[in-house]
Image: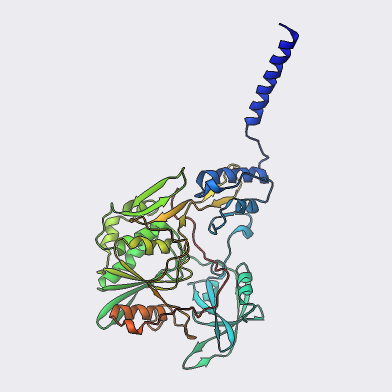
Amino acid sequence: MKYSSLIKILFLALLIFSCEDDDRPEIYEEGSNKYTNDWMYNQMKKYYKWNETMPDKGDLGLNPKEYFQRLLQKDDVYSYAVHPDFPETVPQSLRRNFGFDISFVAYQDKTYGVILYALNDSPAKNNGLLRGQLITKINDEELNLNNYDKIYKSIGSATHLDLEIVSYSKEMGFSNPEEVSLLQGFSFSQPIFPQIIINNNTRIGYVEIPHFDVGQATLFLQVFQELKNQNVTELVLDLRYNGGGDVSSATALSIILAPDIKSSDLFIQFEGNKNGGLVKQSFQQALESNEPNVSFDILKKAHPDIKRLYILCGKRTASASEIIINNLRPFMDVITIGEKTVGKDVAGFPIEDDRIANTKGWILYPSIYKLFNAKNEGNYSSGINPTFNVDELQEAEVFSLGNRSEILLNNAIHLISGNTGKIKTATTSKSLPLSKIYIEADPLLIVH
């Protein structure tokens, strides 16, 4: 063999081995940003609904939280990543930290924060906060038109709040200010207290549901069996502060509410990327994915004698609550009263980095599916418009939830009674605008 031919053979061999080396995936040090971000990128490429619009891998050395945000489609505000050892990565809100939320109004040249709700056995409720109370100061700063939005943003992640509170009623006017201090704490699963409202011999059931927790089917069964036993013929479902939760829980409620459905009827469609495809689930399939202990037939027997449903909704109605509105419409008349909903028409499941034994890793909550009902109706990312647009804060006196004088419930009662002329609709909101409302919507919508 000539010397020149041998050189060529050796050169080709080296080239082949070099190419093989280049094709091998790079190995990163365990626990490093590159190790984490490479995993993040690969998971998002597989599951993320908009994986085809993702950028290239880019700088894997970035902080994982920053790197994850870089992968998201610009208008995706629902996907996020958390690390159990870093509390600052967990989305924060007044509801999560203190068990209440507020909106803002201007009344008699003053700005107030209106307490919308206080969850049962929460730091807020345990310290005496009630719906309808008015906040005049937060952490010694008096609210005004120029600072309320900034203050609202800042207190979402607070661990301690000092509030100045007043109460108001038409009869008594404003009370003297009261100081209330709150420390961050937990709020657990909320009870549900059904009510019966009798109006012109019509028995109306009223149910306020704060969240769709996993395993609520049994609770729904008890609540609505009670309403059925009380012979209600109309139902008002209050979801205005329900940020969502588990799809199977929402399915259980839908089975109870919808008349004349079969277990095999299509309830929900999940539209994923090319890897996920289109997943169609009947009522029974959607129920059994995370509620295996209560059957379709048992839930169906708790159906009250109703043919239509009145839902109270608003700026904090999201996710599984919007599924109730959108996905019941093919099966019954759904009348919504309040304001436009959030528009969370996506679902997903948590993806955990468990590659290192006995070590907590990052958990991804990406938007994996777009949601549609049995008639292929969906795409409500800008929110679901109410049938009747009503601002619940159009009066300075705000009544408790379930009080028949409360504006949204009062409108529902008028509609049920046929007194449409007495409906207090609102073409413009009396509430002051917020640049961002922090919605605590449970991302665990479906079981993977």
Q: Is residue 237 left or right of residue 95?
A: left
Q: Quadrant of the N terminus?
A: top right
Q: Is residue 284 left or right of residue 147?
A: left
Residue furthest right as drawn: 3
Q: Which is nearer the eye, 11 or 351?
A: 11
- Quadrant of the rendered image containing residue 389: bottom left
Q: Is residue 329 above or below residue 358?
A: below
- Residue drawn at 59 percent across, 59 percent down: 90
- Residue drawn at 56 percent across, 89 percent down: 108
How many numbered marks have been drawn onto this rendered protein structure?
A: 0
* Rendered location of residue 51, percent (x, y): 53, 47
Q: Is residue 74 left or right of residue 273?
A: right
Q: Is residue 304 above or below residue 55?
A: below
* Rendered location of residue 168, percent (x, y): 51, 88
Q: Which is nearer the eye, 128 or 115?
A: 115
Residue furthest top as drawn: 1
Q: Is residue 433 visible?
A: yes
* Rendered location of residue 227, percent (x, y): 29, 71
- Residue drawn at 28 percent across, 80 percent down: 418
What colour scheme does the image use?
A: rainbow
Q: Is residue 228 above or below residue 78?
A: below
Q: Is residue 139 left or right of residue 315?
A: right
* Rendered location of residue 234, percent (x, y): 29, 73
Q: Is residue 292 visible?
A: no
